[in-house]
């Protein structure tokens, strides 16, 4: 049995300015945690092992959420494979080892559902990891995340740490990336549809055939699951975090159009890659622990669009 978390002890959230890390910070604050440690890229380069070791030595966190990562959609993964594998390997290796060196007992590593084989059975169970070939369009990123899982498992086995890995499905929400060249499908659709509405376009173009199925989780639900895992007596292992339901890309695009208020047509460009045909997570392990998502896709997209409009207004 792990000791109860003391809400006054320092908790380091790596990647606190990103969509995932900022949601974890919000969740911790809402739950009354009083000592949240953060550092932006200007003050701490997570690619520098010496800087990371110094930071841990100075701040001495008791718990760590490792949400820092280089992320992007199909186009970004295809264009910058070396950066995706190198930067993610370096970040996770530096943070995990520094955490161990500083005596951090509890750490949660954030991965991605793209770690699973491209054509594995659906819904995807944690046990399907490394049972088949990965999706080629994001293989370098997925390999780095698999390495992070194995890193945590290895430190647990050799050093007796309690490092847990959480694999969320496709995430969206406040502080998402809306750059059409590097974003994931849902924020890209929001941005593209919003811009088309403002220009008065008659149509929007969407990559692929529209038939792949995807699962989407609002980022505040994901953060709630991560804090739930840290507060539980889970000592190790891999946990899928999702909603247990999926939609086609066409259905997603139609939902986004309705929420944004764009009444044009969708044109699918089948010459562009679809990626994995289906990616739905089996979330039985989290449900057995007592956690399940609460924010519906419709409600989540409305919240995400409101946040997007707010970010535009502030900019």
Image (spheres, grey):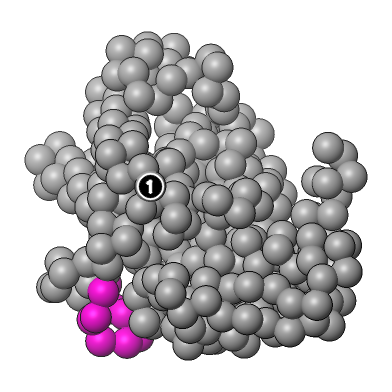
Q: Where residue 142 appears, x then y in whole percent?
A: 28, 56
User: Which image quadrant is residue 69 in?
Assistant: top left
**Is 191 on the left-hand or right-hand side of 132?**
right
Give the vertical position of 173 relative to 135 (above or below). Answer: above
Between 149 and 195, the residue placed more toward the observer is 195
- The answer to whether residue 24 is visible is no
Between 209 and 22, the residue placed more toward the observer is 209
Quadrant assignment for the C terminus: top right
Quadrant assignment for the N terminus: bottom left
Q: Where residue 109 appears, x then y in whole percent?
A: 37, 48
- Please name the residue that numbered disc 1 is placed on: 79
- The answer to whether residue 206 is visible is yes
Say which residue appears at 52% left-offset and 23% top-offset: 41
Is 121 magenta? The answer is yes
Give the vertical position of 44 relative to 132 (above or below). Answer: above
Q: Where residue 285 appears, x then y in whole percent?
A: 36, 76
Q: Residue furthest left?
A: 158
Residue count near mark 1 (Cα–Cα under 10 Å), binned few <14, some 14–19, many ≥20: few
Give the vertical position of 164 relative to 300 (above or below). Answer: above
Say which residue appears at 66% left-offset and 34% top-offset: 34
User: Which image quadrant is residue 91 in?
Assistant: top left
Predominant secondary structure, magenta span: loop
Is 131 magenta? The answer is no
**Is 80 on the left-hand or right-hand side of 183?**
left
Between 248 and 100, the residue placed more toward the observer is 248
Between 205 and 85, the residue placed more toward the observer is 205
Say which residue appears at 51% left-offset and 36% top-offset: 15
Secondary structure type for disc 1:
helix
Say which residue appears at 59% left-offset and 32% top-offset: 36
> What segment is highlighted magenta in the picture?
118-126
């Amino acid at each position: 049995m792990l000791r109860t978390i003391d809400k006054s002890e320092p908790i380091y959230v790596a990647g606190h300015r990103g969509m995932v890390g900022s949601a974890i910070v919000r969740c911790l604050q809402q739950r009354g945690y009083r000592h949240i440690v953060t550092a932006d890229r200007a003050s701490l380069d997570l690619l520098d092992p010496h800087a990371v070791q110094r930071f841990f030595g100075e701040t001495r966190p008791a718990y760590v959420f490792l949400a820092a990562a280089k992320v992007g959609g199909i186009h970004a993964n295809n264009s910058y494979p070396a950066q995706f594998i190198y930067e993610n390997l370096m970040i996770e290796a530096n943070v995990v080892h520094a955490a161990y060196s500083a005596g951090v007992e509890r750490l949660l590593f954030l991965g991605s559902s793209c770690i699973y084989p491209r054509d594995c059975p659906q819904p995807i169970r944690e046990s399907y990891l490394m049972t088949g070939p990965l999706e080629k369009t994001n293989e370098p990123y997925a390999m780095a995340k698999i390495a992070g899982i194995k890193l945590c498992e290895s430190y647990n086995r050799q050093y007796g740490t309690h490092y847990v890995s959480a694999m969320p499905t496709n995430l969206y929400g406040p502080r998402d990336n809306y750059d059409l060249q590097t974003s994931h499908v849902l924020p890209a659709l929001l941005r593209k549809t919003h811009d088309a509405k403002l220009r008065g376009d008659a149509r929007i173009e969407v990559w692929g055939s529209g038939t792949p199925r995807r699962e989407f989780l609002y980022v505040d639900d994901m953060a709630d699951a991560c804090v739930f895992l840290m507060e539980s007596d889970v000592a190790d292992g891999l946990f899928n975090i999702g909603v247990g339901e999926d939609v086609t890309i066409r259905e997603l695009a139609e939902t986004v159009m309705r929420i944004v208020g764009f009444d044009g047509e969708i044109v699918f460009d089948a010459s562009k890659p679809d990626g994995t045909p289906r990616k739905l997570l089996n979330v039985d392990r989290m449900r057995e622990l007592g956690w399940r998502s609460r924010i519906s896709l419709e409600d989540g997209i409305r919240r995400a669009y409101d946040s997007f409009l707010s970010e535009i207004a502030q900019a």
